[in-house]
Structures are given as C-alpha cells and as structure tokens.
Amino acid sequence: MEAYAGQSDPASHAYHGKTKRNAAMFGPPGHAYVYFTYGMHFCVNLVCLGEEGSVSAILLRAGAIIEGEELARARRSVPKPGAERAYVASRDLARGPARLCQALGIDRSLDGADVCVPESPLRVRPPQLGPPQGPSQGTGAGTTVRSGKIVSGPRVGVSAATEVPWRFWFEGEPTVSLYRAHVPRRRKLVTP
DNA sequence: CGTCGGATAATCT
DNA sequence: GATTATCCGACGA
C-alpha cells in the first residue's frame, strides 16, 4: 500500500484541490476512492481518517488471493479472442494496483462505496492474524493472513515527492511488486 | 534476467 | 492538447 495526503503532498490526486474525480477522497473515511488511469486501468484507495479538514488515503498496491483464486484468475483473463492466455502465477494475480482491481472486479461503480457496512459490494474486514513467519498462502489457508515486519520505501510511479517513503509492505511478501521509478512518458512521436 | 515502447482515454489546464 | 499513483509483450544479453 501507499499513503497519500492532500494539500501537503504533491504526489496526491488531492493536491490541486477537490475535483469530480477525487471527490471521494474529500468525503468520509472508510470509503473507497476508485479512479481510472492510463486509459485502461482502475486503482482503488481507502479514504483515511485524519485531522479535521485534512485529506488522506491509501492506495492498495498489491494483495494475496487467499480465497476464490479461480474467480480472480477468470477476471484477470484477457478478453482478446484467439490468443492463448499466458499462465498467471498465483502471486501475480493481484500484484500491482490495477491487477488487484482486476482480480477483485473493482471498477468505477464502486467509487465512494462504504467499505465498512455489511451490505456494501466492497468491504474491508479485520483479519485473523497468522504466525509472523512465512508469506500468505494462496491455497487452503482459510481466512488466516500473514502478519510480520512492516517496512517502507519510496512510492512507485509517482512523478513528484519521490523521496517520501510512504510505501509500506510486509517484508518478504512475494506479492509485492519491485520498486520502479516513474518514467515520464514521451509524447507521441513527431518525426520531421 | 533487463530495458523499452505501445496501448488507450478520463481528467485537467 | 498534455499528462498519467499501469500493464504487457517484445527483444537483447
């Protein structure tokens, strides 16, 4: 996961104030902020409780599929006809913010959803913590998830405040993607 | 392994 | 019109 603040964080979508897209970030905590980016990907945030008037959220960057791997795998299958779908390793099903949304079936219809009420289509529930050793197991592990040492580092893909170490993950967790710095996309080729 | 570029459209200036 | 909190396949070593 990665943390994003509001007016004080140049890397945050909320940095330039409230807009139609980021409105959920300015709403009550415990709700989802889903946005669409790069023309084809969804990413999901959880709005956090901060000081009065402040804005903050965390981007869910990756996850381990504990149950329903078949469903997640089906959602991650590519709609391209004819082409044989390459095998997706279990750990890669939700390895990355857009993949995670794909694996969980999250799209813009869930933007602003309250993740704390039972009737919501998207929920976040407290985990049953497992023993601190070893990564989460993708099969047959029930509802037990891992706990362990949490480490932090710079956020991925952001074009500002790259030195702020607001990315957090379980040390040794295989579903965490490697750090990659932001690469500015060169404008579409204009050859003379 | 690694780096590179194309896809693709909502959002904001 | 420019930019983007990304992913995937291609290609080289």
Image (cartoon, coloured by chain):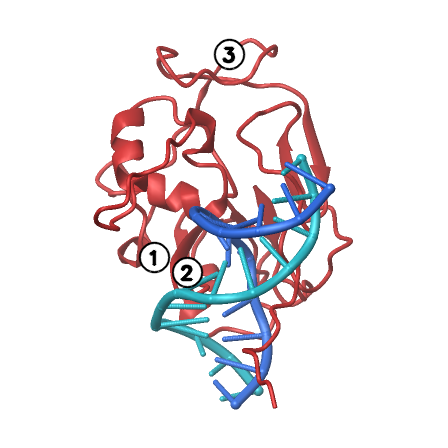
Chain colours: A red, B cyan, C blue
- For mark 1, name the chain: A
Which quadrant is home to the N terminus of chain A?
Answer: top right
The x and y percentages for residue A24 are 41, 61
Circle nearer the viewer, 2 or 1: 2
Front residue of this view, candidates A35 and A182: A182
Residue drawn at point x = 38 percent, y = 35 percent: A124
Q: Let me know if residue A26 appears in the view.
A: yes
Query: SS at mark 2?
Result: strand
Q: Which residue is mark 2?
A: A35
Q: Which residue is mark 1?
A: A111
User: What type is the residue that disc 3 sits on?
Assistant: Gly
The relative height of residue A167 versus residue A19 in the rendered view (above or below) is above
Query: SS at mark 1?
Result: loop
The x and y percentages for residue A4 are 60, 54
User: What type is the residue that disc 1 sits on?
Assistant: Asp
Among the two numbered marks 2 and 1 on one chain, the one whose residue lies closer to the N terminus: 2
Front residue of this view, candidates A162 and A54: A162
Residue drawn at point x = 73 percent, y = 60 percent: A161
Q: Which residue is mark 3?
A: A130
